[in-house]
């Protein structure tokens, strides 16, 4: 049986294809990988967070970018679209492209079932090669749960977890706080009935 090799693309080929594509794709060292579709909960969380960040930073020298802005990670040859990025002072554009930046300080991902393992391991490992990167938030969209990973020194990171709706998340690298209630505002979690409940009646 003959195994067909996956075609590998140059970064230039990927960017040319991405400009005319109907759906966004990531680029990982020669491979083009279509991105998973979003959900209404994913959208609500991203909007809640971005709106609060944008309001909080209206007098600060920070900028907030959402899913339409691409991130280039040169040490891993990755183009990707984080859900939310915070840049301190001016964004640094790759190759003068205003759709691609290289210097986020905070990266935030809203987890989905298909990407959460990669977001926690592979992506985080790649993000750590970015000199400006100092903080990572991973937000669950199926229940109230957030992981916050903050840089404390060279190759040193600390993890904090949030799982109570009465808590508030405070970023370490920029002055910002959001309550879990505001973060999850209007998010609708699926209620899974037990087998016993389903058999009643």
Image (spheres, grey):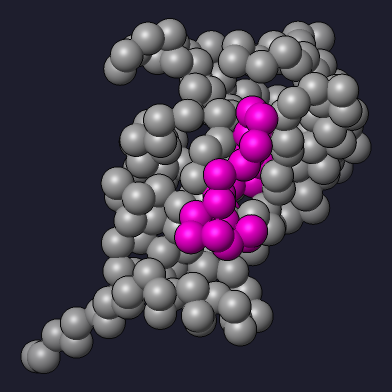
Reply above or below: 177 against 1.
above
Residue 82 percent coordinates (x, y):
58, 47
**Could you tell me if residue 48 is visible in this image?**
no
Q: In screen coordinates, is 114 left or right of 32?
A: right
Left or right, 76 with reference to 193: left
Q: Quadrant of the N terminus?
A: bottom left
Q: Quadrant of the C terminus?
A: top right
Residue at point 79%, 37% (across, down): 50
Q: How many marks?
A: 0
Say if residue 1 shows up in the picture: yes
185 horizontally vs 176: left or right: right
Q: Furthest residue to the bottom?
A: 2
Q: Which quadrant of the figure has residue 140?
A: top right
Give me the residue at 72% from left, 13% from top: 175
Residue in the image at 30% along x and 50% along y: 76
Query: Is 198 in front, or is 85?
Result: 85
Give residue 186's quadrant in the image. top right
Residue visible at 50% across and 45% down in the picture: 102
Where residue 134 sits in the image (x, y, percent)? 49, 22
Q: Is residue 120 within the magenta segment? A: no
Give the residues drawn in magenta, as a range: 80-101
Could you say where residue 150 lies in the image, as x and y percent from the top left? 50, 16
Q: Nearer the viewer, residue 44 or 100?
A: 100
Residue 180, placed above or below residue 5: above
Give the quadrant of residue 68.
bottom right
């Amino acid at each position: 049986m003959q195994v067909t090799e996956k075609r590998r693309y140059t970064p230039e080929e990927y960017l040319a294809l991405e400009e005319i594509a109907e759906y966004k794709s990531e680029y990982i060292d020669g491979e083009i990988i279509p991105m998973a579709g979003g959900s209404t909960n994913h959208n609500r969380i991203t909007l809640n967070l971005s709106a609060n960040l944008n309001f909080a930073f209206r007098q600060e020298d920070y900028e907030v970018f959402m899913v339409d802005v691409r991130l280039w990670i040169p040490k891993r040859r990755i183009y990707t679209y984080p859900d939310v990025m915070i840049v301190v002072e001016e964004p640094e554009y790759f190759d003068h492209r205003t759709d691609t930046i290289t210097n986020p300080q905070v990266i935030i991902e809203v987890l989905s079932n298909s990407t959460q393992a990669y977001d926690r391991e592979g992506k985080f490992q790649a993000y750590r090669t970015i000199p400006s990167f100092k903080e990572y938030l991973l937000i669950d969209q199926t229940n109230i749960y957030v992981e916050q990973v903050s840089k404390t020194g060279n190759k040193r990171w600390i993890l904090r977890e949030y799982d109570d709706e009465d808590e508030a998340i405070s970023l370490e690298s920029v002055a910002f706080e959001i309550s879990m209630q505001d973060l999850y505002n209007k998010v609708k979690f699926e209620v899974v009935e037990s087998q016993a409940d389903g058999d009643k009646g």
